[in-house]
Amino acid sequence: MLSIKNLHAKIEDKEILKGLNLEVKPGEVHAIMGPNGSGKSTLSSVIAGHEDYEITEGEIIYQGKLINEEAVEDRAREGIFLAFQYPIEIPGVSNINFLRAALNEIRQSKGEKDISAKEFMQRVRDKSKLVDLDQSLASRSVNEGFSGGEKKRNEIFQMAMLEPTLAILDETDSGLDIDALKVVAKGVNALKTKDNSTIVITHYQRLLDYIVPDFVHVLFDGKIVKSGDKSLALELEEKGYDWIKEINVPSL
Amino acid sequence: MNKLQNFRKNFNPTSIPLRKEMLTLSEEILKKNDFPTTKNEKWKYTRLGKLSRLSLEKSKDTSTIKKSSEKISEEAITIEIINGFVNTISDLPKGLIIKSLKDCSKKELAFLGENIHLENEVFHCLNSLYIQDGIYIEIEKDTKLKEEIHIVYNNLSINTFNPTRLYINSKSFSEANIVELFKSDGAENSFVNPVNEAVIHENAKLSITKIQNEEGNNFHIGSDTIYQKKDSFFKCNTITLKGQFIRNNIYVNINGTNCETHLNGAYLMDGKQHVDNQTKIDHFTPNCESHELYKGILDEKATAIFNGKVIVHPDAQKINAFQSNANVLISDDANVNSKPELEIYADDVKCSHGSTTGQLDENAIYYLRSRGISKRKAQAIVSQAFIKDVFSHIDSESSLSYIFKTLEKQHNWEFLD
């Protein structure tokens, strides 16, 4: 699915990722944890294809193809989805109309026909129910006037609509209360299949009670310094990140 | 001989029996003046050099030409004007008079030009002295027109001067929605000079939507002078989709209490296109409101000017006047000069103005692209979102769909709504 090798990336002149390795197979859920400033959000932006970041070394291979130079929209069409930490408000652009445009561009890129209006509306109804997103929010301007929790639910709603192969959830839990967290997790779990993969980026262990990872990685100073199963998350919760900074574990 | 005298040397004065004093005064002013230069504040950013060097003839009478232009709607009352001459007028409902100026009586023509300023307005003088044809529209008292009136100006000419006049008489308690479509088809080096005047009587409502979609290398300098009486409503939407050189002057004189005025504009230019919107609203009377919203998107080497002036005269108390101009520059070479102005001589008023110029929101474009939408389409979506509140002021459905279709063709915009 996704294979990242010795990835180095910088923004402006600041190197953030310093030789990161990660291997994600179909059906797996990976959690990436780490203290502030360790490079978690940079990793998600680089995988998604944000143009402000420059890859200086290494490879991102997605479904067997090197995508280092691919445009963000091409990656999206091939099934990569990023749930933003801070979803963007776009006044004047309706949520569902933009999703229809996105869905159709994805389908066109695969040589498929546009979705019919009826089928699309049915999907909007089903998927908004999945994340308890009010139907009226679905038709409002993208994220405009949404609360923090609504914005995050809207990200998962979009994910449900677009059915990605690789979903990256960037701090989707931040700013959510426990009920909203459960709703978001329920949505993510419902979308899981044996063919698609999820990368959950988070600062806290809390979300991982609801989205149970197969692997947990600790990102520190631009590298993955420790990997383990879900118990590693609990250990981190208990001990904090400081002990990571002191031990020297070679990256996997 | 200065440029202006040279410019008009081939033109014969109008054959329409207009008021003598107006014609004499126009001639006097033209004789004394030349084309305004950039030293003139009102022409600071729009150069007339190229226009003044053209060698133009007046257009030949085209009123009998058989040529049917593209219409915006089959349902509207449609007037076709070719090269400045009235060509066809469709059947009229009760309560509406529309005729060519050539068919108007002297009595009807006596009011023509009464509100048009001639002093310091060379283009009003040129128009007045050389009017070749035009339209008189009267919406009779209490007539609320269900059908829209569509005026299609089609310019087919090469090296001609096409001065036209539109006189609108909105009688008390009448309502009308007028759409003016300016097109050109094969025209080159022509100078289109439409001068409109409207009197909106008590409790009357008049909306005008101008759509400018002019191909070729032509010049368009137009003006609207509006006189509002008490309790009246006026709205003008100026939508510029294409044009090499376009100047729009709108002058609104509000001469009665409890009036409402809306001036909206949208311009989407690229290449080396140039659009200059000048508006002036004079509040002479209390308890009125005026709203102005102009937005533009400029790409490549296009230039735009917005100069909006609101004057609140002494005694015009309790005025609400709002003015806003916002621009988006897509390329580094596009250029905007925006100058909102307020002059207030009364003390109990609520007025505001603002102007912004910026780029499209890069974060919004990235967000849309991250969902699979192409960069070009993402830019189009964000541009639409920026400009669509201007379109929301257009009441004419058929005009809106013409505008959307044109934008789709010209800019690959696919409208989401």
Image (cartoon, rainbow, N blue to C red):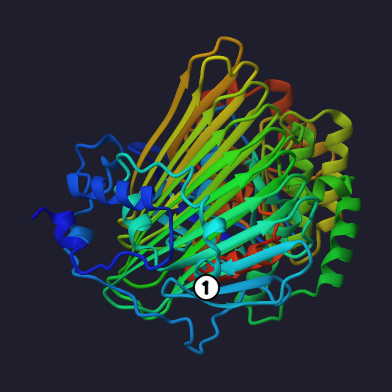
Please, which residue is most extreme toward the bottom here? B66
Please give left or right for residue A3 compared with residue B342 in the image.
right
Q: Position of residue A92 (x, y in %)?
A: 66, 47
Q: Residue at x 32, y 39 (%)?
A: B119
Q: Position of residue B265 (x, y in %)?
A: 53, 48
Residue B247 visible within the image: yes
Residue A26 visible within the image: no
In the figure, A187 relative to B349: above or below?
below
Q: Position of residue B254 (x, y in %)?
A: 58, 32
In the figure, B269 relative to B45: above or below?
below
Q: Nearer the viewer, residue A58 or A126?
A: A126
Please give left or right for residue B315 compared with residue A159 in the image.
left
Please, which residue is most extreme toward the left here? B1
Residue ID for mark 1:
B409
Q: Nearer the viewer, residue B114 or B310?
A: B114
Q: Residue at x 62, y 21 (%)?
A: B319
Label total for image: 1
